[in-house]
Image (cartoon, grey):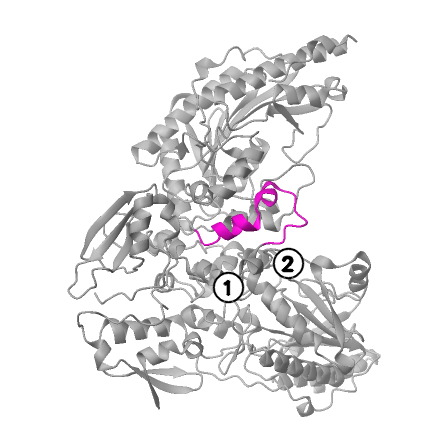
Amino acid sequence: MKFFQWDEWTANSSQWERFSCTIKQTLHHDLVLENRQTPQRVHTPTGKIGIFVSSQSSSSSSTPQPTKTAVMPFGNSHNQLKMKNTSEQEYPDLSKHNNHMAKVLTPALYENLRSKQTPSGFTLDDVIQTGVDNPGHPFIMTVGCVAGDEETYEVFKELLDPVIQDRHGGYKPTDKHKTDLNPANLKGGDDLDANYVLSSRVRTGRSIRGFCLPPHCSRGERRAVETLSVEALGALTGDLKGKYYALKNMTEAEQQQLIDDHFLFDKPVSPLLLASGMARDWPDARGIWHNDNKTFLVWVNEEDHLRVISMQKGGNMKEVFTRFCTGLTKIEELFKNKGHAFMWNEHLGYVLTCPSNLGTGLRAGVHVKLPNLSKYRQFEEILKRLRLQKRGTGGVDTAAVGGTFDISNADRLGFSEVELVQMVVDGVKLLIEMEKRLEKGQAIEDLMPAQK
Amino acid sequence: MGHVPPLPLMVPEYSTHLSHAESCALEAFPREGTTNEPMDATLLIQKKTPMCFLGIVRLNEIGSDPKDCYLFSRTDRRKSAIMTKNCNNDYKLKFSLEEEYPDLSQHNNHMAKVLTKDIYNKLRSKQTPSGFTLDDCIQTGVDNPGHPFIMTVGCVAGDEESYEVFKELFDPVISDRHGGYKPTDKHHTDLNWENLKGGDDLDPNYVQSSRVRTGRSIKGFTLPTTNSRGERRAVEKLSIEALNSLDGEFKGKYYPLKDMTDKEQEQLIADHFLFDKPVSPLLLAAGMARDWPDARGIWHNDNKTFLVWVNEEDHLRVISMQKGGNMKEVFKRFCVGLQKIEDVFKKHNHGFMWNEHLGFILTCPSNLGTGLRGGVHVKLPKLSTHAKFEEILTRLRLQKRGTGGVDTASVGGVFDISNADRLGSSEVQQVQLVVDGVKLMIEMEKKLEKGESIDDMIPAQK
């Protein structure tokens, strides 16, 4: 175990910056304020370290040495003002609410967390505002809380861990998430029947370490993310070579083309997103990048820093996934070269704004014609067992049209990218087989899958 | 209590509350301390502000450097140092002016016309004692470049101090919006209904209804743009107490939005009393709809002539109205009711926010001064098509709206005619303008009905 002296450690800004404010506060309290003599042990992403204060600076002598960095106590005057009221006075009324946050938050939990904040000043009320303002959704169980920065998931663990557990099938705070972006590990997936599968698509999100997330970021940060992204994407070559279209400078012609290609994203109208502050300063620093082939698309500063999408007509999911992984890996490298990694850790995988997208942030899906199977009484059950979900072809809030469904993986966290896409590939293959049987009027009971 | 480590040099943002000498003293010893522990300290300088009690202290603990002075504030009886920093704002200060300055090239609102890079640079490091920052003030104006019918203001206040801390932004906006009102001007408040001349005899063949509304903010609480649930609920509680103490023609009942029965809701809609969660992006972007419908409600008297909205766009919106043209009666009820309500709030040491420069302090700068809109629904089918209609209104200092409110057009020649001014003239003066102006316009309408000319009746600019 490596030991660091307090002054030395706090002066090393890159190390210091990576730690959550709760760790910093605790250490400062224990070591400096309480004058503890024994080293304090801390778990870091790279291993355990010990911090101690040298005997000289821990003595209460005449002139105290100033510490080099002023990391705390940092303040948040607005939150402090709220602290004048009791926890009960401030606790939200969640009696009509049905979202993950409302199911988890208790007055005791609220009391514990209300005085905390992340280093950038994100507070508990900021985390839950969207869930307070939006009691429920007709079709889906919403999450009801968002992150403002990477540290949110640490500082507000006591709220977010149970939310993550509920949302991601019992994922425990001690679980580890595996990332696998090697397309060679995908078996098959290049031969989904094109008579049924209209198109294939894989999307995910990425957050750039060192910047606050869309609910909380300032204009300066958002612009910095855009600048970095444009640079990184501009360096792509070959079939990934493309162009960036900033939302605020778009010509009419460009806009029309992007709409026709179904690429254009608009200012959010969903109250879920608006309440969390993601539409602030629209359309400043938002934009769309896509390659010349129109098979690889990146959204900048929409719901996450980056949304990366690979897609094409037909059923060759393997090709889509290969392009996805190759492109993502290249982009990640380009960002790293500029000193900005993606937010990732071994517990939560890729860190994104909405807890529902943690882990892989991956949704891989196809638009597939299943007119007979979708009317089959066990359709929902089959999907559940295959760990898949259905949506209308217009997206999450729509219904299916003409028996054509968007079928995609239901999971995000606790499975790797390859595993999730494999489930889609295998599952859709089976669904098509079932559809064909039903077309011929044959039974499909023997094809019923076990729970994956 | 352990030694609080000194923080980097930063003169506190609300040093505007300190005199020059005090600011210099602080600059010489620029330390800020934050702790929730009671401090054993010597008070060097003290200053009272609307929000809190500021002071500079030197810690008494043995071994502390005499040069280490701390800025602290006492917001209640206990001595406690408050956070003088807003770490989110400090975090943003790491970015340059260029990086943070909003793109206002597509914008057409008062804020966009006034906010230069210079002003942004000056104000971006400041905050009010409750933590409201420049970006908080202007967010709604950045998110909403313009409005098809009206020139929007594009900035809001978070608390009483906003107008002081961000003077360099608000003063020019106020001047533009309120006809050249200067930072040194004084606003005159007159809620003595007896000073209104006439107004009880507007022709009911033309005037369908009369109405006066205003807003009030409760001192000691932050405004709807930034208040917390606890604060909003406290405002509601105080308001209910004040309103329930009313009697006589003012006796009434409170309907909280979140506990309303379907039947009550239908009745309130039929009476045109119910307000809904805001849909206007101007209000949403300013944060006024947070936690809806918590602590929002409607109170009205049994006669349905006096109505109060709690925690909508302002802490209180007070409305007096009735059918017909007796504006004097409407205004009398308005003044009397307001006074009674204010008395109850004052008893709890929470008077209304008011000062002699800006009059009544409200969330939107457009409502400063009287916050008053006194108006009638009046039938002017002929006059409204006259070539000089707009000119007449301008000269009478009146404005027209459709009968559905600010964003609507008129229907069947019936218009909502009300005072255009808010700041720089008193309540009585503004209602007088409406009363006299509408009387004149009805006369003009009658003349035009008979096919006569009205050229000799065109008024001079008031």
Whole-number angstrom distance, CA of label 2 to CA of label 1: 24 Å
Position of A433 compared to A332: left or right? Answer: right
Residue B248 inside the magenta-drawn segment: no
Instruction: Give the mark, 2 or 1, whose residue is nearer the N terminus.
Output: 1
The residue nearer to you, when weighing B363 against A348, is: B363
Q: What residue type is labelled 2?
A: Asp
Looking at the image, residue A387 sits to the left or right of residue A106; the answer is right
- Give above or below for A256 relative to B257: below
Q: Please tell me whether mark 2 or mark 1 is closer to you in this view.
A: 2
**Element carrying mark 1:** loop
- Subunit bearing disc 1: A
Q: Quadrant of residue B190?
A: top left
Stretch in magenta: B102-126
User: Tag 2's secondary structure?
Assistant: loop
Mark number displayed over residue A284: 2
**Tag shown at residue A46:** none
Left or right, residue A412 beside residue B379 = left
Q: What residue type is labelled 1?
A: Cys
Residue B40 coordinates in the image, percent (x, y): 18, 57
Vertical relation: A104 (above or below) B244:
below
Q: Which chain carries label 2?
A: A
Furthest residue to the left?
B62
Disc 1 marks which residue? A145
In percent of width and height, residue B28 lies at 30, 55
Q: Is residue A415 left or right of residue A394?
A: left
> Badge 2, how many Cα within 10 Å: few under 14, some, many 20+?
many
